[in-house]
Image (cartoon, coloured by chain):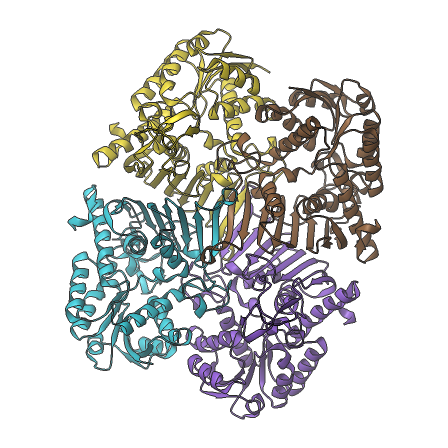
Chain colours: A yellow, B purple, C cyan, D brown
Amino acid sequence: MKQLRIGMIGYKFMGKAHSNAYRSLPMFFPKSLKPEMSVLCGRNGEAVREAARVMGWAESETDWRRLVEREDIDLIDINAPSNAHKEIALAAAKAGKHIFCEKPLALTLEDSREMLQAAETAGVAHMVGFNYRFSPAVRLAKKLVDSGRLGQIYHFRAWFLQDWILDPEFPLVWRLQKEIAGSGSHGDLGAHLIDLAHYLVGGIKEVIGMSETFIKERPLAAEMTGLSATGDKNAPKGQVTVDDATLFLARFDNGALGSFEATRFAAGHRSTNSFEINGSLGSVKFDFERMNELEVYLTRDDEDVQGFRRVLATDPAHDYAEAWWPPGHTIGFEHTFIHEMLELSQALEEGRQPQPNFRDGVNCQAVLEAVERSVAERRWVTISEM
Amino acid sequence: MKQLRIGMIGYKFMGKAHSNAYRSLPMFFPKSLKPEMSVLCGRNGEAVREAARVMGWAESETDWRRLVEREDIDLIDINAPSNAHKEIALAAAKAGKHIFCEKPLALTLEDSREMLQAAETAGVAHMVGFNYRFSPAVRLAKKLVDSGRLGQIYHFRAWFLQDWILDPEFPLVWRLQKEIAGSGSHGDLGAHLIDLAHYLVGGIKEVIGMSETFIKERPLAAEMTGLSATGDKNAPKGQVTVDDATLFLARFDNGALGSFEATRFAAGHRSTNSFEINGSLGSVKFDFERMNELEVYLTRDDEDVQGFRRVLATDPAHDYAEAWWPPGHTIGFEHTFIHEMLELSQALEEGRQPQPNFRDGVNCQAVLEAVERSVAERRWVTISEM
Amino acid sequence: MKQLRIGMIGYKFMGKAHSNAYRSLPMFFPKSLKPEMSVLCGRNGEAVREAARVMGWAESETDWRRLVEREDIDLIDINAPSNAHKEIALAAAKAGKHIFCEKPLALTLEDSREMLQAAETAGVAHMVGFNYRFSPAVRLAKKLVDSGRLGQIYHFRAWFLQDWILDPEFPLVWRLQKEIAGSGSHGDLGAHLIDLAHYLVGGIKEVIGMSETFIKERPLAAEMTGLSATGDKNAPKGQVTVDDATLFLARFDNGALGSFEATRFAAGHRSTNSFEINGSLGSVKFDFERMNELEVYLTRDDEDVQGFRRVLATDPAHDYAEAWWPPGHTIGFEHTFIHEMLELSQALEEGRQPQPNFRDGVNCQAVLEAVERSVAERRWVTISEM
Amino acid sequence: MKQLRIGMIGYKFMGKAHSNAYRSLPMFFPKSLKPEMSVLCGRNGEAVREAARVMGWAESETDWRRLVEREDIDLIDINAPSNAHKEIALAAAKAGKHIFCEKPLALTLEDSREMLQAAETAGVAHMVGFNYRFSPAVRLAKKLVDSGRLGQIYHFRAWFLQDWILDPEFPLVWRLQKEIAGSGSHGDLGAHLIDLAHYLVGGIKEVIGMSETFIKERPLAAEMTGLSATGDKNAPKGQVTVDDATLFLARFDNGALGSFEATRFAAGHRSTNSFEINGSLGSVKFDFERMNELEVYLTRDDEDVQGFRRVLATDPAHDYAEAWWPPGHTIGFEHTFIHEMLELSQALEEGRQPQPNFRDGVNCQAVLEAVERSVAERRWVTISEM
């Protein structure tokens, strides 16, 4: 088994998910490349050392530039906050490293294009972390669309609903600050929906959107890491500079109509990442809170037994299922990352670009930014003008 | 359109459902016999007069014997408390009237047999009120079983769960008194499950059961009508003489295994009347709280899209649906009675016995009583010994 | 009991639902006014006579002008095709009749305003048929919003999905012709969503929409009635002049964000009329295919048992429930019309305008038309400019 | 971090789940003991060597007796076929090793008692693999019961439904042979239900059951491993000597009524492991196919919003949740084993017996065997007579 020596920058929510994926890949997909968890990098030396120990990285490092220059590293995994993606990626490409970068690829479309170009120029492999593509149930949706079993696609509607900042006293974490996060629900949640739309339905032609920041000021956070933060409701307040919710309508290149909604203000929805596709021959529905399931409707069913069927994507007929447990035994969130790393591994072995890669990241960024422009200018924006 | 002149005894919960059915039949099934709502009968003269007015009966009456003797009545509808069924039915049969009788047919198997024999001797039509057979979704289940699309039946499991007497202060209404009601959850709820089992799977060979009365004493009811009652928690208490819950296992004649549970102590279940059938080629699931739906699984579906499908039985392909509203527009509890009366009407026109009739009532009673014997004697009881 | 003498124009889908409502009102709500089903009116004499007989109308009539002039009629019920609403309503108002008019009120906003003004000038009662307001579960949503139990409203999203014209060979019925229907999915389905939004959240400030006609030509219909039609796929084709699907985004006066989607091209959705509301203290979800249920989430629940609860709106604590069946026994589509007629009856008795009335019809039409303008002009349109 | 040196016997379905648990424990629960994956043992030298390599075991071994004698091993993990459990456990206890044994503990009650006594005599820690206790949603059910929030328990009903041998051509794998597996659905699936009943409701007093083998002969398996097998439908047939389905009724010590059903003939159910508990103050429902969810009903909810709520047990308020991903991000089947190993680790550190241990295994076996006796003798069997 060939090895893939990894240097990873970031070790919070995504860093943990990636570490687990690297660790698990060889056990469940023994024919894949074996990821070598070489170096974990973060700014706080003590914290990163402890994280490396717990998650199984051989070494730790506090200077990403040093990491990027190491000769004994094949791939740089970037899951630091969004505002750091570009600089690291450019340096990694220049150093000839393969790159795995979390989404959103960059803070701006321009930056993301620069990253793509750098990676292409350097001839390295590049991948972007749209992990939801790797749910077996989503793969089934893709298979049904691509095989024509849903017919011509008329509608794609998707919503990613959360409620973690519903409380106005929740502190001003970095994900609520534009200069670090780029945007709020739009880039964090909407980006996933856009990528799923691209993956499942195809290119988007034009968009128009609407955004809102419901809670405009929040207590400054004392400390913040990943999604959590310690706050003090009497702390001085700062401005929330990202969107709490962004909705948009879209027209796809193939004529389908799209509806998208991302919000962090949907009480009761911890992380409802859902989509539905309606075609001339059938429909599918997905909800990540029940990620092992895909609801499927097919018009060709006998008239008296037509209805949405709940397919549990754990049978051998479904992607990845045989690597896991017997039918009916479910997998969870973290498995999407393991499958993602499998794609990375297979692409490297086959000498092709992984899917999704920086081009998909750019395409997503183009739609994100087109929506932002449509919000600012209160008009339809075509993707081609971006 | 020929008419069917009806005299009905009882005017509470079931009386209201029957009245509505008679009223609605000609509008939605205009080819059926036209029920003439002639006489409504009850013991309280003032109350029955008011009920007749509100529900649309031409006359009222306080003496059922007088009603039964009237020459201008074709059918006697009995929905008085269970302990009155037998005497009325015998008199009605003797008078040559057709009979519709609510379930349970009688307090004992012997009584129910006497009723069947009386009706057969008199040559009148007889029907028993197992209304759940007439849900379109249940009819679909029947069709799937009978056509062989579910294959050989292995399992039937059914439960009828309610919670209306969960509160120990709920008063001692007639449904909790053996001399009037015959039994508790068993005869009230279990009887429906047994009839559905007979209808969908076939005859039962042997049973063994278990019963419990969780709350053994309750405040005496000041007044009681139908399901409701006014109580006073400081009222003197009386003995609950029926079962709060009865469960039993059964073996069907065709080798299938059955599991039945009826209870009034299932918190949160207002009226969950559910069954599931598993066969060699498929399964169906039904829950009356979502009575328009049947979940259907078929093994012949393509491997990658196997799953229970939620069939909404409102399409033209489903029984009764065309009489009602467009696909996707649901019907409710009361419609089962309208369909029941349609069967009554069609049977009379075709000169055959309605389904289900007193024979089905007797068969149900035999199982009910076999279960009671199995509880008392703590042993398996075969239906043939009853 | 005072009577209300009704003359009804139209006797297909809606006519049947209204007739059933008038028939059922006195039995289930005996304190209401008693509707007198006096005259049924339609163009085809033989057909309307037969419909009157089946549905229980005393007389039939083929000329609505004659009907409107009759002195023995108190209320005109208009459920003829949409293009006839205005002329009839104006005549009825002029004749001093109360008016119940199906939605959409008119083909244009201007027409609907004219109708409102005529009714107000004449001093008659006027009501518009947004029947979904009268589902007990929707009433519960209204109660939760109005009482503040959901807090400040952030999001309203709604979709009305059908699939009855998915087949490109389905014929060109009147509902697909702009001159008769006014619009397609937008006015037929979207109108209901807009009214629910008004009812539950309040006024809409601005909108932007997107429309599509996926199948642009269809076989001409041989004959057409209500929703059904007989077609011949070899028949000459005609132009579909209404929208198959219309989506729009909206901003409410109170700052909430709205997302609306109406389509007839959602395979598997016979009639999915759904909405969700997210507030600062909770959320609710509704789906008309399970119309007895409302999913409710409340942030104040104990931390370890937070979740959407499935409330079955059949308990005495819910509107209308006591008139029907015991808890857990559901009602159906037709019951919304009975409750609607109850409101009409109560309003007439109390000498107030029913809710919803022509003003609500106008408000709905304003949004419908604003959306159409926004589609045509590809820009945000404020309701105030309409 | 102290280490726990493990020798594991068996490496198929359960061996893979256990290996993954040992690997994952230190990363997600860094305060736990660190399991050292020392030796993997199996009969086929080549296969076990390859399994050890893939799953991360330091060494492999083909003779379990040699393994048990090694001084550098602290714990013996037994997941070999059921008929091997006893002999290995006795040897391990004698050698002073802690023991983790998969369920069912043994083929007979007598054997399981011998194992318990041996472990107690040796003073070693012993645990049995009832992994479903370790779903966060099941833990929530336990918490609600123990805290009294469900009140007095009236009902426990549970069913474990699978369909993997529905096809009569499915070969005669070891799980269908009594001398190896002990029993069929009863010991495999029913055992889990019994343990959950003990865990959640308490001791069982008496039982009566019913069993069936629907397909009495099957093609001999060419080769068999874990749950899968390669078969040839023309192969000679052998006798199926275990039950395909076993149902039983039970009375608990605390008066609650129990209903249990285990089957491998429920088409469409890949692995539906469900239970429901009804108490005087509330109810809970669980289905392992949606293992992150618990449905909870509480009578104390406000009257107008009573209903089963879908609690997603991924919030910090739920057991284990903080070790994993943010709220709304689910875990899967394999996580129950990681939590199981956490309990093992914590118990060893705290010097107490893990829960569940061999005593729970014995208690489960007593019920299993009482049910078998009740089937054979067609009578109620009390647990105390076992």
Return the x and y of residue B252 as percentages of the image width and height: 71, 62
The image shows residue A190, relative to residue C66, as above or below, that is above
Most foreground residue, D188 or B29: D188
Apparent side of residue A140 relative to residue D161 in the rendered image (left or right): left
Apparent side of residue D270 relative to residue D83 in the rendered image (left or right): left
Residue in the image at 53% along x and 55% along y: D299
Most foreground residue, B48 or D146: D146
Quarter of the picture containing the C terminus of chain B is: bottom right
Residue in the image at 45% along x and 39% along y: A270
Return the x and y of residue A97 as percentages of the image width and height: 45, 12
Return the x and y of residue B276 as percentages of the image width and height: 61, 56
Name the residue at the front extreme: B234
Return the x and y of residue B292 as percentages of the image width and height: 49, 60
Apparent side of residue C192 relative to residue A352 in the rendered image (left or right): left
Residue in the image at 29% along x and 74% along y: C349
The image shows residue C241, relative to residue C316, as above or below, that is above
The image shows residue B253, relative to residue A207, as above or below, that is below
The image shows residue C126, relative to residue A360, as above or below, that is below
Residue A172, image quadrant: top left
Quarter of the picture containing the N terminus of chain B is: bottom left
For the question of whether residue C127 can be seen, the reply is: yes
Most foreground residue, C4 or C110: C4
Residue B102, image quadrant: bottom right
Most foreground residue, D140 or B160: D140
Apparent side of residue B144 relative to residue A183 in the rendered image (left or right): right
